Image (cartoon, helix red, strand yellow):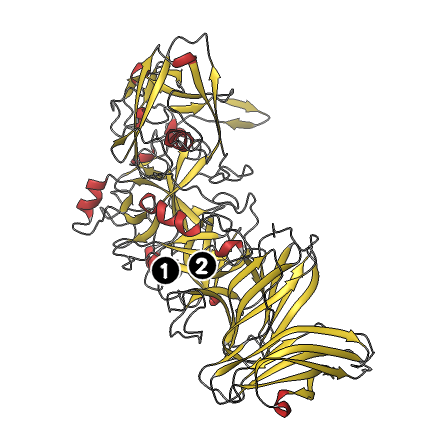
Amino acid sequence: MQSAAGFELLYSLLAANVTLPDCPLGRVHCDSSLECIPEEWVCDTEPDCPLGDDETNCRMCGSDEFTCSDKTCVPNYRLCDGTDQCPHSEDESLCTKINADGLFQVMKSGQWFPVCSTSWSDALDNKALWACADVGQGQVMSLNEVNLPLVSSFIHVTVVVNNVSEVDTASQSALLPYRVVTRVSSLCQDKMSVQLSCEIKECGHRSVHLPQPFVLDAVESSDGQWPWTAAIFSGSFFKCGATLISDHWVVSAGHCIYNMVNSPETTTIRIGHVNIQASNITSVRVSDIINHPDNNYIYDNDIALLRMEHPVALSDLQRPLCLGDYQKDRSPSLVCYVAGWGVLNKSSVASGEGTSLLHHTKLKLWEQTKCQKAYPNQIKPTMLCAGYYSGGMDACKGDSGGPLMCQSRPEQWELVGVVSWGEGCGEVGKPGVYTRVDPYINWIKSVIGDAGKVNASCDFEHPDICGYSSWSGSEFSWSRRSGGVHVPAMPSADTTLKTTAGHYLYAYIPYNTKEKEAVLVSPGITLQAFPSCLQVSVILFQCTRCQLQLQTVNTSGGVSSTLFQISSQTPFWMRFSVDISEPFQKLRFVASSGRQIYGGVGLDDIILEPKICPYMFLRGWNTFGYLGYRARLKSPEITDYVPLCLSFRYRISSPSAGSLQLCKQFVVSGSPYLDCSIWSSRSLGPQPEWGQARVSVGASTVNFSLVFEMVQGQGQGYVDLDDIVRQDGDCV
């Protein structure tokens, strides 16, 4: 008690008895707050409570012991001894490393040993492939031998692939399941050890500029926290989540895209921002959608791949997630998360109303036997479960196709599952079911790999389309298609296989895409010999005003020259050849939709060879006799106001096949005007063999282009054009 100047202060201390509200089943209180976290989060090495008190007062193993996921302790001398001590084999993982000197080392019974190089043949040896994969890195860069005269003990490694011992050739896939047998010995020929260099994986790394959020249920993600998480849109509507696995490809669930396979031009991928409605988010159109060939909706093989029309620029905000190198069992002790834009509470499930902001939550992998008990007779070996028996945290409606990602190594994350299905959301005893990714690694890499065909020459049969990229500002865009009867209207077959199974590139003209352009660019040209011959198959299918230009691109990215322009309808595939006389960096195909809203422009079988073309002509096939159809070959614009003499050779297979005429095209008040009164084969009669023509073209006072136009007749046959030569002055 204290008193002063007429005031008296009385105080006492009372012991407050605060009763915390009960946590839901399967959760416990944080010491520092009223928040409840799953029991499995306590002492899991990741702080989840606001002050991290869930990771204090945990049972600690000694410095000479290893801590298992169930908190039991294993002596270090039992690590990597070939016998599981931990319930989920954690003591038999992370048994390899490459040290600072590049020496590949293997742990045996808690000690690190250099690897004897005996029987390590070269960088394609399966042991080298296994070694780089096991240390969490990419392809083998180099394999060398180093003499270690002072080392007394080495480790010998035997790699068993598919139960076949010592497979030393690269004929076996590096993605097959491995089993490794090791033994320590003082004997090693010349004491030579393995020095190994592997490609550093750029995948699976989060931004280094992240806040430190504590996860409770589903919380908002930060930009760069899950930089591989992408969203699939059909038109302006969000469809599903996806995961970036390379600069060109995302993986999603097959059931998400089963009705979108034939409409890639309306599909876009958004990535690089947690807010999928943000104005600065990266949005890229899709050029190909590939469902797993054995997909049965959510019931089996629920996985698909989507190729973006051009690569995304990799950064802290958009980076691919790692894929495993081979199939392996995952420990339930792994730290795993699921992320998506799906519904956030059960009350929104019926409406399906998701969120525009990315959310994530931490999950635990279930053992397969428990997963099968939760869903009797429904779980395939290619599925896995994740969640909590007590429920609460789970993927939900709208999260389909998104990633289940686990931390496979320090600071590196790996795609383990794809959100597929479940009973309800966060129900007790009903975990989420995911497509297990590692059984599909071979399939994924066979689809997204370039198969050594990054080249300007391409038949477009492989999904990676030889490294070609495209750009468009509308649904009029290049996509890889197969033949057959489809909506939208497309050619019934390609020119490579000439069947409905063959593939080609096609820019379909959908509604509201008048006067649009779609640009297709080849990879860099390695061909150095000039002149070069370029051959390409083209179709302008059921579109009367569409066009295709072929241009060359120089080293600075600018257009060097326009080699040809094709306009008007060509209802059948036509083969074009053109000589290129000057060096260039890339090929550029520009399709224009015109003012029509149907049909499209097709490309196939591009061949670039270091030689002069054996022929260079427009061949128009008339198979079904569509009278009056026209095909045009247009020259670059002519700006010389002088008379010209044009000589060329032509032939027409039969009188009823059609005719050839020479025209001048002007632009009058912004619209093209065609004058075809200069020359026509109609006045000259049949020409079944090659004939020579010389035509004088009078001087013009405006810029113009020369156009060769083939007009189809009623009968079958073709019209050929070759050896076009232009000279200034009238013909003599």
Looking at the picture, does residue 634 appear above or below residue 243? Answer: below
The reply to whether dot 2 and dot 1 touch (C-beta < 8 Å) is: yes
- Whole-angstrom CA distance, mark 2 to mark 1, is 9 Å
Q: Sequence order check: which comes first, mark 2 or mark 1?
A: 2
Q: Which residue is mark 1?
A: 256
Left or right, residue 8 beside residue 13: right
* Count of numbered circles on the image: 2
> Is residue 23 in view?
yes
Image location of residue 19, percent across then percent down: 32, 36
- Position of 7 compared to 87: left or right? right
Label 2 sits on a secondary structure element that is: strand
Other-residue count near label 1 (Cα within 10 Å), few / some / many at <14 / 14–19 / ≥20: many
Residue 583 location, x and y as percent? 69, 55
Vertical comparison of 692 with 352: above or below: below
Q: Which mark is residue 247?
A: none
Q: Secondary structure at mark 1?
A: helix
Q: Residue at x 43, y 18 (%)?
A: 193
In the image, residue 621 lies at what x, y percent? 50, 79
Q: Amino acid at mark 2?
A: Ile
Examine the rendering and report whether any part of residue 22 can be seen: no
Residue at 38%, 25% (x, y): give it: 56
Q: Badge 2: few (under 14), some or many (20 or more) residues near its Cα, within 10 Å?
A: many
Residue placed furthest toward the bottom: 683
Q: Quadrant of residue 323?
A: top left
Q: Is residue 234 or residue 355 the one in the foreground?
A: 234
Direction from residue 72 to residue 169 in the image, left or right: right
Residue under label 2: 232
Which amino acid, by three-letter code, is at mark 1?
Cys
